[in-house]
């Protein structure tokens, strides 16, 4: 029977890891991830998992140990946040180029500096081109369910690409919610047994992984990596469908959730926990006769350009909310992608971008309401006050 | 080795895995250099300095004697020639390819 428990997002993900039962977990503490691995360490100490837990001296080592174990043929996981992810930067690219299906929950936190420990998306957005599939979660339940699905996506023979599942620092990681933890047997059956393609420990069949690729092979190697990455899109949808069927899940496991978009005139595109607040504001506006809608983006890499363009086509105006900055770019990272998705689409909506929630800056319904007000005003005036604005900044 | 060089990118092993152990020997690096060492057996005093200093393993030895250079792997770094102690003429000299 599924259990309904009061859990933080970090604990919910630790439960997913317990059901995944990885062979090796290497970890180093960093706020706000620490309590996730702490909970998992409880499972290790209690003999509830078979995992070999390796306590390493840094995140560079955590990812290196995870990579080494995965290459040796073990299902391996780690988790991190912010500067820890930044310290892994080098090894993230190596893991994806070796096509190692590592799954890593990342608790989104602002990057230093100035130093800050609260939530924003600057950490994982900073590694958006590292060749990792990048899945966002709105709440603890989704973080749990995305982690279970991530194993199936990463290990799919056509994909073999690492996946990071993200949850917003503190808001999800430390907030307590009711979470449904699925029956162990059923979850384990869904995740399945890891059958590695090879092992580096077989002395009878010696292999080399990680050889130098000069100009004669590097580009070719990267092209194979890119094409496998693109194939992950179909696998993400298949795994989502199977997951919903297996567990009767009510969550949306497509690239994004289109909330009240069918007849919407104004919409907000958003990632992560803020989607909950936007949904509430959309409901409020709908009750007052405003045709508001929301796109809650779940999969950021691979980015669903075509699907998103179809969903946004025909809107009067839309705003993209970014919880990180892309310095010198056209607004934030999500805005850059969404605007690119709409190139050549007619009729394309009017579009603007808001930077919000940096370093844990609160985002309240009134701020989201102001975004919809700006959209309505822009349609009347046929222009935006600002192409890229701020929300809840002392200005 | 040839199967990798002749392969289209889609035919390459996933993740750059090399399934053939020890095939670095078959990787031709002798084309890299601008200069190549030329060995003169008549001057050579068989001190083996070149053999010791060669950062590859491109000094060929037969029956306990230096006999030639392995041009398939020699990258033309000129360390052998620099270390060669014979005077006034060196037993290994660098010449432009």
Image (cartoon, coloured by chain):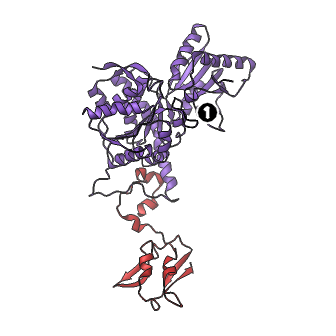
Chain colours: A purple, B red
Q: Tell me if residue B12 comes above or below residue B44 in the rendering.
A: above
Give the quadrant of the C terminus of chain A.
Answer: top right
Give the quadrant of the N terminus of chain A.
Answer: top left
- Residue A250 as seen in the image, left or right of residue A274: left
Residue at horizontal 29 percent and vertical 53 percent from the top: A201
Total labels drawn: 1
Q: Tell me if residue A98 comes above or below residue A318 in the rendering.
A: below
**Spot occupied by residue A297 in the image (x, y as percentages of width and height):** 52, 27
Which type of secondary structure does the marked residue at label 1 adopt? Answer: loop
**Spot occupied by residue A216 in the image (x, y as percentages of width and height):** 51, 60
**Spot occupied by residue A253 in the image (x, y as percentages of width and height):** 44, 26
Q: Residues within 10 Å of mark 1 (few under 14, many from 20)?
A: many
Residue at horizontal 50 percent and vertical 55 percent from the top: A218
Residue at horizontal 48 percent and vertical 88 percent from the top: B40
Regarding residue A182, the answer to whether it shows in the image is yes
- Residue A372 as seen in the image, left or right of residue B40: right
Q: Tell me if residue A28 comes above or below residue A391 in the rendering.
A: below
Residue A111 position by quadrant: top right
Closer-to-camera residue (A8/A278):
A8
**Spot occupied by residue A262 in the image (x, y as percentages of width and height):** 56, 17
Regarding residue A248, the answer to whether it shows in the image is no
Q: Which residue is mark 1?
A: A332
Closer-to-camera residue (B70/B47):
B47
The chain containing the residue under callout 1 comes to A
């Amino acid at each position: 029977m599924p259990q309904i428990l009061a859990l933080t997002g970090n604990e919910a993900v630790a439960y997913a890891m317990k059901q995944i039962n990885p062979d090796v977990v290497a970890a180093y503490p960093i706020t706000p991830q620490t309590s996730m691995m702490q909970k998992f360490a409880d499972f290790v100490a209690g003999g509830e998992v078979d995992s070999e837990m390796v306590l390493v001296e840094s995140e560079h080592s955590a990812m290196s140990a995870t990579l080494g174990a995965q290459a040796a043929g073990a299902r391996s996981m780690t988790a991190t946040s912010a500067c820890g992810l930044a310290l892994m930067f080098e090894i993230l690219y190596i893991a994806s180029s070796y096509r190692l299906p590592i799954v890593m929950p990342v608790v989104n936190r602002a990057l230093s500096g100035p130093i800050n420990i609260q939530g924003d998306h600057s950490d994982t957005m900073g590694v958006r081109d590292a060749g990792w599939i990048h899945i966002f979660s709105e709440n603890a339940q989704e973080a749990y369910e995305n982690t279970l699905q991530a194993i199936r996506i990463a290990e799919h023979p056509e994909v073999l690409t690492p996946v990071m599942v993200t949850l917003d620092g503190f808001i999800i990681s430390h907030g307590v919610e009711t979470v449904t933890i699925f029956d162990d047997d059923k979850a384990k059956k869904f995740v399945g047994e890891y059958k590695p393609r090879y092992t580096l420990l077989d002395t009878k069949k010696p292999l080399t992984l990680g050889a130098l690729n000069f100009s004669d092979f590097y580009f070719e190697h990267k092209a194979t990596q890119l094409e496998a990455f693109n194939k992950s899109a179909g696998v993400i949808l298949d795994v989502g469908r199977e997951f919903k069927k297996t567990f009767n899940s009510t969550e949306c496991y497509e690239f994004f959730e289109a909330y009240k978009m069918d007849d919407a005139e104004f919409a907000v595109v958003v990632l992560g926990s803020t989607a909950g607040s936007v949904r509430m504001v959309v409901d409020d506006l709908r009750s007052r006769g405003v045709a508001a809608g929301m796109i809650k983006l779940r999969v950021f890499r691979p980015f669903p350009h075509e699907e998103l363009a179809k969903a946004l086509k025909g809107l009067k105006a839309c705003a993209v909310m970014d919880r990180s900055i892309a310095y010198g770019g056209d607004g934030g990272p999500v805005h850059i992608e969404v605007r690119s998705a709409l190139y050549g689409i007619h009729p394309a909506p009017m579009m603007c971008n808001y930077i919000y929630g940096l370093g844990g800056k609160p985002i309240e319904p009134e701020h989201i309401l102001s975004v919809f007000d700006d959209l309505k005003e822009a349609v009347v005036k046929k222009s935006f006050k600002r192409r890229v604005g701020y929300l809840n900044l002392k200005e | 080795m040839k199967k990798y060089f002749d392969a289209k990118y889609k035919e390459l092993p996933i993740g750059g895995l090399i399934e053939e152990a020890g095939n670095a020997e078959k990787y031709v690096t002798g084309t890299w250099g601008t200069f190549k060492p030329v060995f003169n057996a008549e001057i050579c005093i068989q001190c083996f300095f070149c053999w010791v200093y060669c950062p590859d393993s491109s000094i060929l030895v037969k029956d306990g004697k230096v006999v030639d250079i392995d041009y398939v792997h020699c990258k033309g770094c000129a360390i052998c020639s620099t270390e060669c102690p014979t005077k006034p003429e060196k037993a290994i000299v660098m010449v432009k390819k």
